[in-house]
Amino acid sequence: MSGRIVILDTETTGLDVAQGHRLIEIGCIELLDRRPSGRTFHRYLDPQRAVDAGALAVHGLDDAFLSTQPRFAEIAAEFLAFIEGAALVIHNAAFDLGFLDAELARLDSRHVPLARRCEVIDTLLIARERFPGQRNSLDALCRRFGVDHSGRTLHGALLDAELLADVYLALTAGQSTLNFAFAAGPAPAAAMASRAHPAAQDACVRRPRVLRASIEEQAAHELRLDALDAAVRGRCLWRQLEAAGVADAP
């Protein structure tokens, strides 16, 4: 996967692009090697049609406000430049891509669908595979991973992209995957053998094999810990042990 990721979300005038509903907001956040770069793309759009009452109740973006915003054609080139070369992370990707492709096709009948131009990662599909039979909406995943979504009284593309970034990092780098094992258990066979044979133990003491993590491995380790910190909304267990001087102990 590309080291550059764009977390993407949209808001629309309604649910069905086939009925002529349009985009009214696009929000994107850039991650570089799984860290926020600080770059975002956020635009409100004039859809040139009325917003459905049901959609208005979800996002609160009314016709009067949207009529003062640019049309999609005015920001399309900037949007495409922002996502160029990135993997797109989207929750329920078929919905957002359907609206984006429809807008782009209005501008160019030869438009190639975004899913054929970019790698697309659908967090809804990942969540359904990981948590079958459970609710996997963005709100449900925020609750599951401890991501603070208390400010989400209304949906908003940039806010939802920010929440999805935290959910994506937690979903793809959960603490349970690290398999920490600090509890005492049966000694490994190799350790038992060295205790049974002092000569072998002496050889290990004289010639220890020390494997140092590469710079890349250390960076990957820190990225994983950052994701764990986000998931637990604080310091994960490993960083607590580091702070106590336990994790670095020989």
Image (cartoon, grey):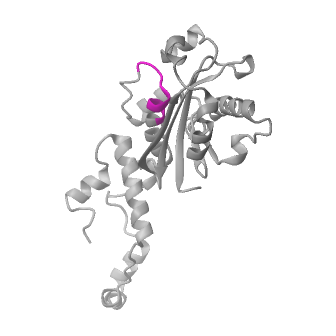
Q: Residue at x 60, y 10 (%)?
A: 52
Q: Is residue 76 left or right of residue 149?
A: right
Q: Is residue 122 visible in this depiction of the protein?
A: no
- How many numbered marks appear? 0
- Quick check: 10 above or below 65? below
**Residue nearest the observer in this picture, 105 or 233:** 105
Of the pair 147 and 164, the residue shown nearer to us: 164
Quarter of the figure that contains the N terminus: bottom right
88 sits to left or right of 218: right
Q: Kindly identify the residue that appears in the image at 63 percent across and 35 percent down.
A: 93
Is 194 covered by the magenta stretch?
A: no
Foreground: 191 or 55?
55
Q: Is residue 147 left or right of residue 108?
A: left
Q: Which residue: 44% across, 19% down? A: 154
Q: Is residue 144 visible?
A: yes
In this view, the residue farthest toward the right is 110
Looking at the image, residue 162 lies above or below residue 214: above
At 54% from the left edge and 37% from the top edge, which residue is drawn?
A: 8
Which portion, as a residue range, is magenta?
153-161
Q: Nearer the viewer, residue 65 or 124?
A: 65
Q: Which quarter of the figure has residue 104?
A: top right
Residue 178 placed where, x, y %? 43, 55
Q: State which quarter of the image contains the C terminus.
A: bottom left
Residue 129 lies, in percent from the top left, at: 60, 39
Q: Position of residue 146 (x, y in %)?
A: 37, 34
- For this orientation, the residue located farthest to the top is 53
Residue 159 magenta-highlighted: yes
User: Residue 122: horizontal and vertical position, in percent?
Assistant: 61, 39
